[in-house]
Image: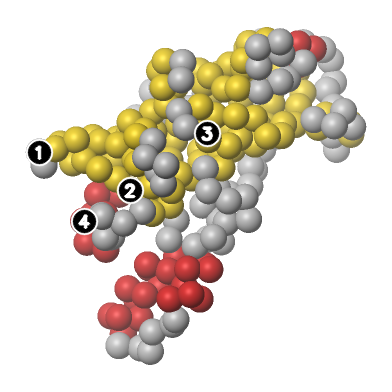
Amino acid sequence: MRDHPIPAATEPLQYRAIGVVRGTYRPQDSEQFTRGFLVDSEGVEIEAVVLGRVLTLMRRHLAMDQPHLWVVYPRCREADHLHLQISGIWEPSTLKQTLLDESDSESSSDSSLELEDQLPQGDDYFSIRGELIYTRPETGDLVLKVRQKPRADGSRPLPFKLQLKGDVPLSNLRHFVSLEVRRRGQQLHLEDYEVMGPMPTRGGKGRGGRGSLVRRDGRGSQPNN
């Protein structure tokens, strides 16, 4: 079993947008179970859709009237309006307890099982990696372009844009960045970032030549050859 729902990036320029949100899933209606809302502890309703591979798990093993830590893909179709695609759940305690029940083994205590569900980054954490195509430090507005993997049939999904709140200098425009983000209500707020380097051009070289890794504190390091 993996020890984290968001694995470490395997390539410097690996695109992704993934996070975890704790909330109770409420279907739109009985006939539209895959469309609904995630409702957090403060009552904020976030529009959500359930991807097919999660349906069986939800119906067989989860108490749907209780909050869970959902693994989600974020989309921002409009400013201040977050949309989530539910791709999984991070709840090792549920899987472990199910296996124990099926084997008639002695159950672990509730407190020890709940500790397994906690993440070091906490709830509402997102990892977003892509090209910075818009930044306006004076208003704290950012836009990232995220590309998706080719489908099984070889077709390429269109890239999508994510609107975020945070301060990244204009000098990093058209660079590939790795962002650590926190959800607040219907918005995604920047907590930390790393500049991986300028985006490659068609000739295969970055716009600014050989790039360096720059963290938010301004310290840089040359990438390994």
What x and y, as percent, mark residue 121?
62, 50
Q: Which residue is mark 3?
A: 184
Q: Residues within 10 Å of mark 1 (few under 14, many from 20)?
A: few
Depth check, mark 2 against mark 4: the one in front is 2
Could you tell me how far apart the alpha carbons at marks 2 and 1 are, in whole angstroms? 18 Å
Q: Earlier in the sequence, mark 2 or mark 3?
A: 2
Write the residue at 45% across / 28% down.
Answer: 186
Which label's residue is closer to the chain start, 1 or 3? 1
Label 4, on which residue? 59
Q: What x and y, as percent, mark residue 6?
A: 55, 48
Amino acid type at image mark 3: Arg
Say which amino acid is labelled 4: Arg
Label 3 close to label 4 by CB (< 8 Å): no
Nearer-the-camera pick, 180 or 40: 40
Which residue is identified by label 1?
31
- On screen, 89 above or below 96? above
| For residue 141, side relative to residue 99 (left or right) | right
Where residue 222 sits, quadrant-wise, is top right
Q: Earlier in the sequence, mark 3 or mark 4?
A: 4
Q: Secondary structure at mark 1?
A: loop
Query: How far is the residue under mark 3 from the one under mark 4?
Result: 29 Å
Could you say where residue 87 lies in the image, as x and y percent from the top left? 38, 43
Q: In the image, which is nearer the foreground, mark 2 or mark 1?
A: 2
Using the numbered discs, state the Cα–Cα distance from disc 1 to disc 3 in whole angstroms: 30 Å
What mark, if any, has residue 181 been given in the picture? none
Disc 2 marks a residue whose amino acid type is: Thr
Residue where numbered disc 2 is placed: 24
Mark yes or no: residue 60 visible: yes
Q: Is residue 55 above or below residue 13?
A: below
Q: Nearer the viewer, residue 84 or 160?
A: 84
Which of the two discs, 2 and 1, labels the residue nearer the N terminus?
A: 2
